[in-house]
Image (cartoon, rainbow, N blue to C red):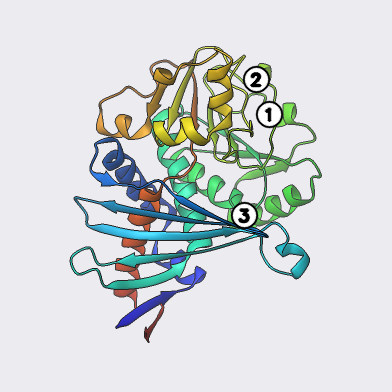
């Protein structure tokens, strides 16, 4: 049995952000249309961390994959990354494993692309300013996704220490010389008059004051992933409409929404799956003054769809290494 092994660089070379946005929009649509099999992810706890197994199968495209991602908080003390991940792509006709690829890179790409798909559907066409909260491993792809779908001229970055924000600003400046990039001194400075606000932090409490959000802004929230975490405070956002990648997953994992529902500020039926908007079954933005919020907890259909396309392009370009196993 031959298996193609793809590094982080291979994944990046195989699929551009613009292409990944289209792939993830289709994956959302298939999920909302009931044309995907997505078993609940399986967490396996060990004394030092947790490993998650996330499988998915997309019926029309035949994409079949499983992601294995581990989160071990003490790894930094050992000189290792906190998160490790691989994605195994499988032939849905034969069950033969096809490829093993770097899951950290693929996850960052598909998560950014998911926000890009939502931003393309929900943000105002004239969006020019982006506020970015967080500057970790997901941040670059989040910014790249937004500037791929809107004419962004300015990026404000905020982190509590400012150190990682300065590093991200420098990297963005090198990649996009014409983009105005600066580090905000406070959350309010970052979010005021921003057309798009993206949050990719591990904060358990809101990272900005809803009162500072301008009418007509679009918000992406991809950081909080447990019922206890509340990166974005929806209470106090006027004329708010909430969109999710998966209603079931969001109501089980997204503390931003779970806590708002428990407090009576939001109803489960207020959540619209972004795939329904892709399919034309639900409206996206309906007025210039609406505030739209896309909350993503990440769904395995994104991994399967992205992995399938990465593998196809990698084969065409001769990327990766084929090994006999």
Most foreground residue, 217 or 323: 323
Which residue appears at 59% of the width and 15% of the height? Answer: 263
Where residue 145 appears, as percent x and y from the top left, is 48, 46
Question: What distance separates the C-alpha of mark 1 from that of mark 2?
Answer: 9 Å
SS assignment at label 2: helix
Q: Is residue 116 above or below residue 74?
A: above
Where residue 189 appears, as percent x and y from the top left, is 74, 29
SS assignment at label 1: loop
Q: Are marks 1 and 2 in contact (CB under 8 Å)?
A: yes
Where residue 170 appears, as percent x and y from the top left, is 70, 54
Which residue appears at 21% of the width and 50% of the height? Answer: 59
Of the 4 image quadrants, the one containing the N terminus is bottom left
Mark earlier in primary sequence (2, 3)? 3
Q: Which residue is mark 3?
A: 137
Q: Is residue 319 visible?
A: no
Most foreground residue, 103 or 164: 103
Q: Which mark is residue 206?
A: 1
């Amino acid at each position: 049995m031959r298996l193609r092994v793809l590094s982080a660089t291979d994944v990046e070379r195989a699929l551009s952000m613009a292409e990944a946005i289209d792939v993830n929009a289709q994956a959302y649509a298939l999920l909302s249309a009931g044309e995907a099999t997505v078993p609940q992810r399986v967490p396996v706890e060990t004394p030092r961390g947790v490993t998650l197994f996330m499988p998915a199968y997309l019926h029309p495209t035949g994409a079949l994959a499983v992601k294995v991602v581990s989160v071990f908080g003490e790894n930094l003390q050992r000189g290792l990354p906190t998160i490790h991940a691989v994605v195994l792509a499988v032939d849905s006709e034969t069950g033969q494993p096809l490829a093993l690829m770097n899951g950290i890179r693929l996850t960052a790409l598909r998560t950014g692309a998911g926000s890009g798909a939502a931003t393309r559907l929900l943000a105002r066409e004239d969006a020019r300013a982006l506020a970015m909260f967080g500057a970790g491993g997901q941040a670059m792809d989040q910014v790249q996704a937004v500037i791929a779908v809107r004419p962004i001229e300015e990026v404000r970055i905020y982190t509590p220490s400012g150190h990682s924000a300065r590093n991200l600003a420098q990297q963005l400046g090198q990649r996009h010389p014409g983009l105005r990039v600066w580090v905000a001194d406070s959350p309010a400075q970052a979010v005021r008059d921003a057309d798009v606000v993206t949050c990719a932090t591990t904060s358990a409490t809101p990272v900005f004051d809803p009162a500072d959000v301008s009418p007509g802004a679009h918000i992406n929230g991809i950081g909080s992933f447990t019922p206890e975490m509340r990166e974005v405070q929806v209470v106090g956002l006027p004329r708010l409409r909430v969109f999710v990648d998966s209603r079931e997953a969001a109501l089980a994992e997204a503390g931003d929404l779970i806590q708002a529902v428990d407090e009576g500020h939001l109803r489960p039926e207020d959540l619209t799956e972004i795939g329904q908007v892709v399919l034309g079954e639900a409206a996206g933005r309906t007025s210039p003054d609406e505030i739209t919020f896309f909350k993503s907890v990440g769904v395995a259909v994104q991994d399967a769809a992205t992995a399938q396309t990465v593998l196809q392009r990698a084969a065409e370009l001769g990327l990766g290494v084929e090994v006999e196993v």
